[in-house]
Every structure is written in C-alpha cells, then in structure tokens.
Amino acid sequence: MEQPTAEPPEHSESQPRWRSAVDRSRRTLGVWGILLAFVVYTLVQNIGSLVATPVGALQTQVECEGFTWIEPRECNPWGAEVLASGIPSGHSIEQVNRMIIKRSLFGLVDQCTAAFQFDDGTTAEREIECR
C-alpha cells in the first residue's frame, strides 16, 4: 500500500515565516544600499571636481563641471577651442569673463553646453560637441 506523499511545509519549524520575510527585506535593503553608495560616490567625485583656470591672453575663466567627465588638464584646451570657435551673437570674445562647460543630465546624455558670462552681467549659452 502506497503512502501518500506529504508536500513539504511552506515554512519549516527551524525557520519561522517571519524570518524569510526579514531575509528578503535585508537583501532588498542591501541592493538599495549599494545603489545609493554608488550614486553618492559619483556625485562626490564629480560635483566636487570643478576646474577653473584662466585661458588665453584675455585670461577668461574656464570651468569644466565634473559631469563633463574630462580630466582637469583637458579643460584648458577644450575651453580654448570653444572660445576660438565663436561667441554667441551680440558679444565679442573680449567681453567674456567666464565660461562654464557642462554636460546635461548627470553626464548621461551626450549633449554639452558652454555658458558664457559677460562683463555687462549678461549670460548666453550654446551647445557644443562633447568630448
């Protein structure tokens, strides 16, 4: 005579039902913790790496935001190229006292912008090629 096979209980006595829920919660929190640590690390590394250096005979301040993902030594040549390629209409290169090169959306989108600040307090932006 065959004995009916009993299905294993969903939770054994050695591991209560609440323990498996706690284990799942710990794993979920662990994944979120790793993701949060990566985001914080990325922000600290890149927001804090703003580079400001004078470029050219006019000593225009060029800043490359951290999310441009370029090395500090590459900021000056890039800024010089952007300045040489032209200034937004209505202004001359002599009027530029500061230029900020930035990449939108935390560096994930391949779109860069050069923001110009002029002596008279006005600002202008134009899209540039990212590196």
Image: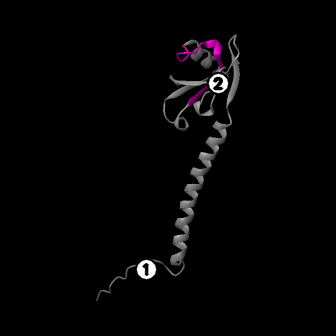
Q: First in sequence: mark 1 or mark 2?
A: 1
Q: Secondary structure at mark 1?
A: loop
Residue plotted at (56% across, 55% down): 32
Q: Is residue 22 magenta?
A: no
Q: Is residue 87 above or below residue 127?
A: above
Do we see residue 32 in this rendering?
yes
Count neighbours of disc 1 (C-alpha within 10 A) and say few if under 14, some if 14 to 19, many if 20 or more: few
Badge 2: residue crowd in 10 Å (few <14, some 14–19, many ≥20): few
Q: Nearer the viewer, mark 1 or mark 2?
A: 2
Q: Position of residue 59 (x, y in %)?
A: 71, 15
Residue drawn at 63 percent across, 33 percent down: 66
Q: Residue furthest front?
A: 120
- What is the secondary structure assignment of the residue under circle 2? loop
Residue 117 location, quadrant: top right
Report which residue position mark 1 lands on. 9
Q: How is the image coloured?
A: one colour
* In magenta stretch: residue 90: yes
Asked if residue 131 shows in the view, the reply is no
Residue drawn at x 58%, y 58% as measured from the top left: 30
Q: Which residues are magenta?
A: 86-102
> Seen from this angle, which residue lies furthest bottom?
1
Question: Please, what is the three-letter code of the amino acid marked with disc 2?
Answer: Gly
Q: Residue at x 41, y 78 (%)?
A: 8
Residue 60: x %, y % from top left? 68, 18
Q: Is residue 12 left or right of residue 74?
A: left
Q: Quadrant of the N terminus?
A: bottom left
Left or right: residue 121 versus residue 27 is right
Mark carried by residue 121? 2
Q: With respect to residue 25, does 33 lie above or below?
A: above
Q: Pinpoint residue 121: horizontal percent, then vertical percent.
A: 65, 24
Q: CA distance from mark 1 to mark 2?
A: 74 Å
